[in-house]
Structure formats: structure tokens, C-alpha cells
Image: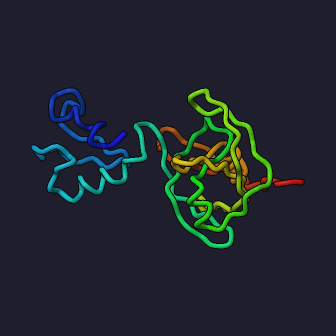
Amino acid sequence: MSLTRLMGGLWNGRGGDAKGWEVDLWAARRPVDCGQAMSHCHRPAFRKAQERATQARVGHIVVRARLSARRSATADFLVDTGATHSIVPPALARKVGAPTLPQRFEVSLADGRRRRLKACSMSVSVGGRTGPTIALLLPGSDPLLGVETLEALGLKVNPERRRLEPSRAQTALLVGA
């Protein structure tokens, strides 16, 4: 859902708060004083917020993570405590040169469908913590950090501050034979 759609109600009285403020998904607040729809807005700050929000949804946490295998890259990940596994699009796994595991894993997706997906192994760095993880390869998906990766890195979600925080000392995720 785009920021335009999320915030579209601000201009016609269906959204926002009583003071006419736009609520930014990244905790910044600024007055709504642009009379144009955000997709046509002339203000760079609005365009930048719209670009950053294309993968975010209200109440969700998006973090920047560094992935490493043969090469490294950074990507924005949606943190999903309802997902057991982390997910990356195959193109991102190829970009970092992550080796694909020989077996497929049967998983249930959020919409209830069951799929057999390939997976890859890589190192992930978030919030100053780094560790190995196994990520499922789901074509057309946005990068997603699941609970196994969060637990291995010793991170937990602080829903009030909408960020990740240390939960304990970092542990290793054992990727075994």
C-alpha cells in the first residue's frame, strides 16, 4: 500500500488527527499544507516519504539490514514476528552470491497457501549484530525478517518505539547437516 493511499484521507477529512498533521510512518510529524495529492506533490519531503513507504504499512517495522555471502548488499526488511523464516527475493540472494541449499522447504504462506521453496544461507547484520541465517527464496516478495533470524541475533521488537532492541546476548543459529 502506498503512502498516497494511506494518507489520501487527510485531504478529504477521513484521516489524520484533529490538528491536521500527517503521521509519518517513521515518527516524523509535519503539517499537511499541500493542497495536491501526494503523488503529484511538489514538495521533495513528501515525495521522499512516499518512496520510502511503498513497502511499509501502518504499525509495521522496517529495518535496514546488510546481507553477506560472497558479496554484500543492504536492503530494507519488513520485520514480521508472525513469520518463522526470513524471506528474500531470489534476485537479492543472487546479488550477494548466497549459496542455494539443495533441498526445498514446505511452508505455509500468510494467505494460507502451501509452497515448496528453495532457500539460501547468508549472513545478516541488523542493529549492530551479525549472524548466519537461512532465508527462503520467494519470487516477487519483499525482504522479510522472521523470528528465527531475530532470535539468533538476540533481537526483539519494541512495538511502542517501533524498532528492534537487544533481547539478550547474541546466540548462534546452528545451520547443520
Q: Does residue 24 appear to the left or right of 99 in the view shown?
A: left
Residue at 24% x, 30% y is: 15
Image quarter hosting the N terminus:
top left
Residue 113's place in the image compared with 164, above or below, is above
In the picture as drawn, the residue positioned furthest to the bottom comes out as 71
Which residue is painted at 62% across and 34% down in the image?
Answer: 109
- Residue 13 picture location, percent across and down: 16, 28
Q: Residue at x 30, y 37 (%)?
A: 6
Quadrant in which the C terminus appears: bottom right
Picture coordinates of residue 26, whole percent (x, y): 38, 49
Report x, y in % for residue 120: 71, 56
Count of all numbered marks drawn on residues in the image: 0
For this orientation, the residue located farthest to the left is 35
Give the answer, above or below, for where 171 lies relative to 161.
below
> What colour scheme does the image use?
rainbow
- Relative placement, left or right, of 148 versus 76 is right
Picture residue at 56% right of the left edge, 59% below the top: 91
Specify whether 160 is left or right of 152. left
Q: Residue furthest right?
A: 177
Side of 103 relative to 19 (left or right): right
Residue 138 or 23: which is nearer the viewer? 138
Where residue 156 appears, as percent x and y from the top left, is 62, 44
